[in-house]
Image: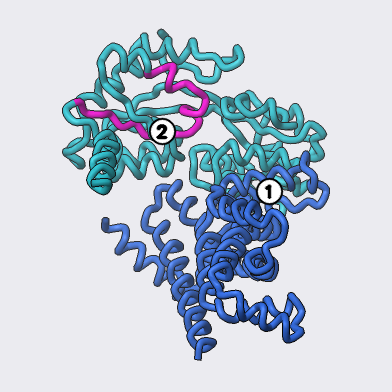
Amino acid sequence: MEFLWEGIKEAIRLIASGDRQVLHAGFVSVLCTVSALALAAALAIPYGAWLGLYRPRWSNLQALLLRVGMFVPTVVVGLVVYGLLSNHGLLGAADLLYTKLAIIVGEFLLAFPIIGSLTYAAVADLDLTALETARTLGASRWRAMWTMLGQVRVSVMTAFLMAFARCFTELGVAITVGGNLEMRTRTLASTVVLDLSRGRFSQAMAPGLILILIAILITAAALRIAQEQKR
Amino acid sequence: MAALLLASLWAGLCSGCGGAEGSQRLRLTTTTSTANSGLLGHLLSPFEEETGIEVVVVAVGTGQALALGERGDADIVLVHAREREDAFVAAGFGIDRRDVMWNDFVIVGPSSDPAGIRGESNPTSALKRLHAAEALFVSRGDDSGTHIRELGLWKTAGLDPAGNWYWKAGQGMGRCLVMADEKRGYTLTDRGTFLAFHEGVDLEILVEGHASMRNPYGAIRVNPDQHPQVNASQALKLLDYLTSSEGQKRIGTFRVDGEMLFHPAIEY
């Protein structure tokens, strides 16, 4: 157990000394997760809401697929993206394998089902009278949908945080299509794996603790925003 | 009622999860090269049958394998990084180091070989060419035995590889081979892992056979004076078996696709 304590000391040392590799890994983790989440939220929130409110054709099937998507192992998503970006794959010519963009694509696929399906579940519970009222008052379907989404802000924020948790800590995508390349695509989570494989247990704890620290900051900020919106 | 049923089901499932009572297990930490190639299954099954000892194989990098031994979380280690092994013994973590076998390293690269190293007999001159051409080189970068050897070869060549062409992957050999294949780069690999992977990849052995590319494996018992809980008596039995003529013969007869991957350390 002593390496847990050692890990805390090491984490403080790495942050205080501004260790280039750990800072870069933190940068890669935050950049990839934030980009993937922004993209996923922009598409999955309206998609999930539309599905729940207007029940288009096959909406039950789509909702089911979204739910299943939340359970796909990150390595399987990594494998699918690898298949696409590989030299022999459909998008091989784009030369995206082992880049941050490849990680963003994979994390987008991880985040989309979580945000989409939880948004869907939240609006499906709503009383639809408000929607009908807005529609009779002449609001477009799109406009009325945004009004309804306002009522489930907190649920959408929770969905966003769950997607954040899945992407920020994942390894399957970062290692399979990112390649865990030093000072390029190495994330905090994959730094932990590498230090572990080197047998450096306390050094492995440090990036793990930094990861948790960033997660606390982002969660706190998100909850703050949600509370202010409520007021 | 349902909760009770679930609880008993759960308890039933979990009873098989812990360590087996009575019969002690023998924990061997080793490198992925020995486990992934299938050698260990071939080598250990007669030993397990004869003695009734269950050997739990933990296949990790050399760095982690030794670290687990250092912490007393292994009973015996089988690794390939001679300097690390000697340091491990010198520090009192291990005793009774013995040579078990050897295999060799090769430099592989794309068949188009843009840096023109094919047929180079000395790996250090090949590395010099790669450095001069700034040809993409995938380094393990994980403190594994292969990585330590690669760094040693660069040092012998008098070079300090760095730059956009030198990728530190921090991953196992198989994944590094896939990366080199995808990006048409070069890498240093043990022959066994390459043979296991070469069908799927467009990489060829370009440099091989030099004396500096030999890769000896040693087995070390974890020191019971440091960690009284280790399974010292069975570890000694396994070590004796590995270096016995029977064990050595088993290593010498192991083939993958008709190729010999490991050479016994002792004449049998």
Q: Residue furthest bottom?
A: A231
- Kind of residue at disc 1: Val
Checking the image for residue A174, the label placed there is none
Question: What's the residue at 46%, 28% (across, down)?
Answer: B35
Circle 2 chain = B
Gap in angstroms between the C-alphas marked 2 and 1: 31 Å
Chain letter, colour cyan: B
Q: Is residue A134 magenta?
A: no
Q: Position of residue B240 (x, y in %)?
A: 29, 18
Q: Residues within 10 Å of mark 2 (few under 14, many from 20)?
A: many
- Whether discs 2 and 1 lie on one chain: the answer is no
Residue A25 shows in the view = no
Left/right placement of residue A77 relative to residue A90 reads: left
Tell me where residue B199 sits by quadrant.
Answer: top right
Residue type, label 2 = Thr
Q: Position of residue B57 (x, y in %)?
A: 37, 30
Q: Secondary structure at mark 2?
A: strand
Q: Which mark is residue A81?
A: 1
- In the figure, B175 relative to B26: above or below? below
For the residues carrying marks 2 and 1, which lies nearer the camera in this image?
Answer: 1
> Could you tell me residue B122's position as x and y percent?
67, 31
Vertical relation: B13 (above or below) A117? above
Q: Residue at x 65, y 26 (%)?
A: B208
* Region in magenta: B23-44
The color scheme shown is: by chain
Q: Position of residue A78 (x, y in %)?
A: 62, 48
Could you tell me which residue is drawn at 44 percent across and 16 percent down?
B42
Helix, strand or loop under label 1: helix
Residue under numbered circle 2? B30
Q: Colour of chain A?
A: blue
B45 on left or right of B169: left
